[in-house]
């Protein structure tokens, strides 16, 4: 156990998600990447192609208030703090839009050109990038947001400032294909972390920060 999660009582309506994804093939990829394994140029190309194919219609399906309730709740109660916010795996910018309504988004990154092509460029600089090798300096990001995104934990740890906030959102909980249990998300991050989390709408959120000063922590 690399950290502890303090669960807050829900303040928004919690809704049982539709059942469609817990045995989805992308779950295997999610587990492999979370374990620090299984990413290659071939897989990057395959994953980009999968999301290119899914891009048409994605935005309408993924931008409702219910889907994005966990993000809104994290923004309300997660204690994100100020500073440079970067979103990784932004897709068509459904979450970017909600974040940009509250604060600047320094960059929103994704692997799929067709997802990015559907994002509103007035919201943020949208950048094609692979989360496995982020084009970001070490310790340069204060708030990193992931919504239904793979856990490239070593790379996220590298680019996040020592007192940065790691925001992990699952919009449909265990039914989202790209999903890991919250304890595993924290365990995959190098060193020791403390997180706050809750449920909202059909999903859940975590905001994690390093236990500075503890063995294995950076800073
Ligand atoms: C499940 S979708 C989520 C999209 C968006 N966050 C949302 O909730 O609507 C996962 C996104 O991650 C992107 N993605 C997958 N692997 C990636 C990688 N290695 N680097 C950057 N983006 C990646 C995909 O292209 C896709 O847009």
Image (cartoon, rainbow, N blue to C red):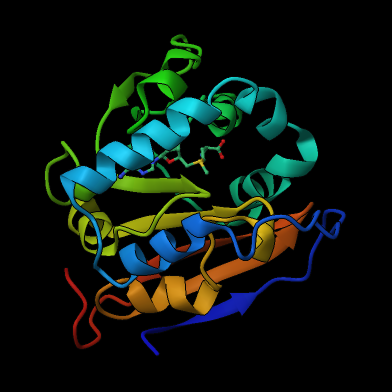
Is 53 above or below relative to 209? Answer: above
Left or right of 183, for residue 31: left
The quadrant of the picture showing ligand 1 is top left
* Residue 86 visible, this orientation: no
Is 140 above or below relative to 197? Answer: above
Q: For residue 150, which quarter of the picture? A: bottom left
Left or right of 179, for residue 176: right
Q: Position of residue 35 (x, y in %)?
A: 31, 73
Residue pictured at 23% horizontal, 55% vertical: 39
Is 187 above or below relative to 44? Answer: below
Q: Number of numbered discs present?
A: 0
Left or right of 204, for residue 39: left
Q: Which residue occupies the foreground of this view, 12 or 90?
A: 90
Q: Position of residue 123 (x, y in %)?
A: 48, 16
Left or right of 177, for residue 9: right
Q: Position of residue 3 (x, y in %)?
A: 41, 83
Q: Which residue occupies the foreground of this view, 29 or 91?
A: 29
Q: For residue 111, which quarter of the picture? A: top left
Q: Position of residue 175 (x, y in %)?
A: 68, 60
Residue pictured at 61% horizontal, 30% vertical: 98
Q: Which residue occupies the foreground of this view, 37 or 1?
A: 37
Which residue appears farthest toward the top when viewing the image? 122
Residue pictured at 16% horizontal, 68% vertical: 219
Residue pictured at 51% horizontal, 24% vertical: 92
Quadrant the N terminus occupies: bottom left
């Amino acid at each position: 156990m690399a950290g502890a999660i303090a669960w807050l009582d829900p303040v928004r309506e919690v809704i049982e998600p539709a059942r469609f994804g817990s045995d989805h093939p992308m779950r295997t990829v999610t587990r492999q990447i979370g374990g620090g394994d299984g990413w290659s140029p071939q897989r990057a190309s395959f994953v980009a192609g999968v999301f290119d194919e899914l891009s048409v219609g994605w935005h309408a399906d993924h931008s409702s208030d219910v889907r994005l309730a966990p993000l809104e709740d994290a923004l309300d109660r997660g204690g994100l703090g100020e500073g440079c916010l970067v979103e990784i795996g932004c897709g068509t910018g459904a979450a970017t839009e909600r974040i940009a309504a509250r604060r600047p988004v320094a960059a929103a990154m994704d692997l799929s050109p067709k997802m990015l092509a559907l994002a509103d460029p007035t919201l943020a600089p949208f950048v094609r990038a692979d989360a496995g090798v982020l084009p970001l300096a070490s310790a340069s990001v204060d708030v990193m947001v992931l919504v239904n995104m793979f856990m490239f934990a070593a790379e996220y740890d590298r680019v996040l400032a020592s007192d940065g906030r790691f925001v992990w959102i699952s919009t449909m909980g265990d039914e989202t294909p790209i999903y890991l249990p919250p304890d595993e998300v924290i365990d995959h991050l190098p060193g020791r972390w403390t997180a706050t989390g809750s449920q909202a709408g059909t999903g859940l959120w975590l905001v994690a920060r390093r236990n500075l000063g503890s063995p294995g922590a950076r800073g």
